[in-house]
Amino acid sequence: MTFWFLLLLGLATYLIVQRSVAQITRTPVWLLWLVLMTPALILSGWTLIYGAQPPPPSALVIWPSIICILLYWLLFQWGRRTPRDTPDQPQAIEQSAIHPTAEPVPVRPIEPTEETQLRNCFPWSVYYIHNIEYRPQAIICRGQIRTTPTQAYQQIKANIEAQFGDRFLLIFQEGFNGKPFFVLVPNTQAAKNTSRPEQITRPGLALFLVLATLATTTLVGATITGADPKQLASDPNILLQGLPYALGLMTILGIHELGHYLTARYYKIRVTLPYFIPLPFFLGTFGAFIQMRSPIPNRKALFDVSIAGPLAGFVVTLPLLIWGLVNSELVPITDQTGLLNPEALNPKSSILLALLSKLALGSELTSNSAINLHPIAIAGFLGLIVTALNLMPVGQLDGGHIVHAMFGQKTAIVIGQISRLLLLLLSLVQSGFLIWAIILLFIPLIDEPALNDVTELDNKRDILGLMAMALLIIIVLPLPQAIANLLQLSAE
C-alpha cells in the first residue's frame, strides 16, 4: 500500500512541477521534484523500518518539510528565467473579463486612426505608455506607472470611457516581471445592446432545487439514523428522523452561499441566486453555488466576496456542531475509528474538532474515546470540512481568491502549488485527505483577476485573511501531542 501511494504521490508531484514552473525556471524539473519528494521518502522509510506503529516523531515531519520548501524556493529562484517583455497570460485575462458562458459578440476593434485617442488616455504623469500590443480579443498597453495604482486605474478608466464609451472593460494587472500593465477587452454585455436585460435571478429554479435537496438530504439523514429503506416505504413518517441532519447541513451550505451573494450584491456585481445540487445518495447534496455574471472591480471586493462565504458558514457551523457533540455518544476507539467515520470519529484527527469536543463533552472525553455523532453533529462536522475545503488557497476556491487578493496573482500561484503538495504530504499521516489532495490537482492555479488587480488590501483585511488561513490549519492538522496532554487526551 505504501509503495502504490508513494508512486501516486510521486507522479502527481512531478506533473504539478512540470505544468507549473517548467516554463519559468531553468532548474531541472527532476531536481525540484526530488526536493519536494524528500519528506515523503523520509516518512516512507520510517514506515518501512518501524511499521505504521509507532507514528513518526513530529520533528521528522515538520523540519524536513520546512527545509525542503525553503530549498525548493531557492532552487526555483536561482534558475528563474529573466522576464521578457511578452504578453502575460492574455488568454486568462480575456476570459476573466467576459463571463465564460456568454456567447461571443462581434465588437468593433480599435482602428488605426483611433490609436492616437488611445494613447491620449494615458497621461505621462499617470502612466507613461511604452508600447501597445494588439491581440485578437485584447489590447495590451505597457508602460511605467507614475502614481498610486488606485489613482492610475481611476484616471485611465475615466479617460477610456470618455473616448470609447462602454466598448471596453479595462483591466489593470501586475505582470510576472513585476510591472503593472493595462488590458482593454471587448465589453460583450454592452455590445449585445438588447432592449430586454438578461435575467440572471431565477427564483423558481432556486426554490425547486432547495426543495429537491431537502428531500434528498432528509432521505440520507433518515438512513444515517439507522432507518431501514423497507420501513421508509411502509411508514413515510420515519423520514422525519432525517430532518435534523437535512436542515442542519442545508442551513450551513445556504448561509455560506448567502454570504457570497449578499457581499457580491453590495459591490453591485451581477450574481445569480444560490443554487443547491441535490444528490439522492452519499451526503444528499453536492453543495451549493452561485455564479457571478460581471467582473469583480478590485482586490478589495474579491477578498470580501470570497471570505464572506466561509466565515458566514463557519459562524453557523460552530453552534450546530457544539450542540450536536453535546448530544452525541462516546464509544471506544477501534480499528474502524477515523476522520471520516461518523459512528466512531476520532476527535484528535483535527485540532479544532478536539477543542470543541472537549468543550462539549468535558471530562467524559478521554484518550480512549471516539464519538458516535448525532445527526446534527454530522452536519456540523461536514460544515467544518466544507469550510476547510473552500479555504484551501488554490486557484478559484475561496482560499485561492483570498491569497490572490492579499498577495497578488504571482504569489498566489506559488502558494497554491505549495498548498497542493503539502496536502499530499499530509495525506501520508491523514489518509482521509487523499481524496482532497487529488481534487486539488485538477483545480487550475491561475485565478481570474479583478479589473483593478494591482491595488493592495489594507492591513485589516490582511489580518483577517491570515486568520482565515489559521482557521484552515487548525481544522486540517491533527492534534499535536503537547495540546493533547493539556486536554488530557494523550494516550495512557
Image: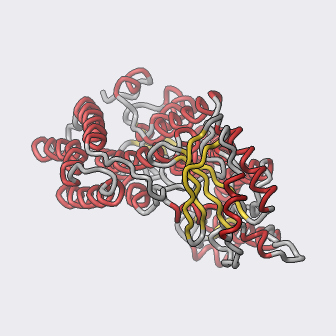
State the residue lying farthest toward the top.
Answer: 486
The structure's colour scheme is: secondary structure
Q: Which residue is drawn at 26% across and 58% down?
A: 14
435 up-or-down from 306: above or below? below
Observer-nearest of 10 and 283? 10
Q: In this view, does 208 lie to the left or right of 477?
A: right
Which of the image's four quarters has the C terminus? Answer: top left
State the residue lying farthest toward the right.
Answer: 195
Which of the image's four quarters has the N terminus? Answer: bottom left
Residue 235 locus on image (x, y percent) = 69, 73
367 up-or-down from 116: above or below? above
Observer-nearest of 317 and 171? 171
Q: Which residue is drawn at 64% across and 78% down?
A: 233
Residue 455 locus on image (x, y percent) = 63, 39
Residue 275 locus on image (x, y percent) = 70, 65
Q: Would residue 335 be seen by someone viewing this image from the given angle? A: no
